Image: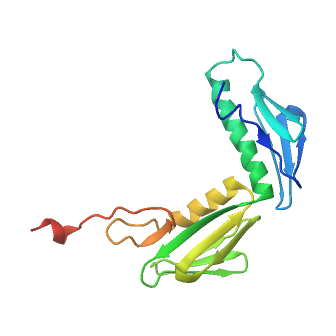
Amino acid sequence: MSRIGKAPIKIPAGVTVTLGEDNKVSVKGPKGELSQSFRPEMAIKQEDGHLKIERKEETDGRLARGLHGLTRTLISNMVVGVSQGFERKLEVIGVGYRAVVEGRKLNLALGYSHPVEIEIPKGIEVAVGKGNVITINGFDKQVLGDFCADVRSRRPPEVYKGKGVKYIEEVIRKKAGKAAGSK
């Protein structure tokens, strides 16, 4: 039995979970609505304010054991997303580098000869604060993560000066460079 998979998921007040056929789970809350289908090897049950995920057969192979914890985590992320939401912060570092939100587009000046425009997906809110810190909020963790990775990929931080777009909690290990190695 998976340690992660056997933990029940508490359904907070204001969130409704609907279990459909073919292991389809729909979660609706104050922030939005998410639905996803899961593999048939998993049995999803709703009991007195909790969701439990079990394997249909305990003798199932390696695949079912791996899917057990994954299914529980995905459903938990759906419940947390529609009730509280998720937030990631990115930092733009570099002289002349800046970020501006204009309508549903994020405009970045990242040292290229042209501005970089990124369309903001539905369900994502972007705000730029002091010090070029980009705060990204959303209720779907996968869409949020994909958007953050897309923004970061436009100019990943480089290892000599640390210029670029990085996650706020990310630590860039800088290299010494040519001048330090010639002594």
Q: Is residue 98 left or right of residue 14?
A: left
Give x and y (percent) for residue 18.
90, 43
- Residue at left offset 77%, top offset 36%: 38
Question: Vertical placement of 145 versus 6: above or below?
Answer: below
Query: Is residue 98 visible in this depiction of the protein?
Result: yes
- Residue at left offset 75%, top offset 43%: 75
- Residue at left offset 71%, top offset 37%: 71
Q: Quadrant of the N terminus?
A: top right
| Image-quadrant location for residue 2 | top right
Viewer-closest of 170 and 115: 170
Question: Vertical placement of 174 versus 75: above or below?
Answer: below
Give x and y (percent) for residue 43.
80, 28
Q: Is residue 35 left or right of residue 94?
A: right
Extreme residue toward the left, this view: 183
Q: How many marks?
A: 0
| Image-quadrant location for residue 116 | bottom right
Q: Is residue 127 left or right of residue 98?
A: right
Query: Is residue 115 visible in this depiction of the protein?
Result: no
Coloration of the structure image: rainbow
Q: Quadrant of the C terminus?
A: bottom left
Give x and y (percent) for residue 56.
78, 21
- Residue at left offset 55%, top offset 69%: 90
Q: Is residue 41 left or right of residue 159?
A: right
Extreme residue toward the bottom, this view: 96
Question: Vertical placement of 128 versus 7: above or below?
Answer: below
Viewer-closest of 39 and 47: 47
Give x and y (percent) for residue 98.
52, 81
Question: Vertical placement of 20 versus 179: above or below?
Answer: above
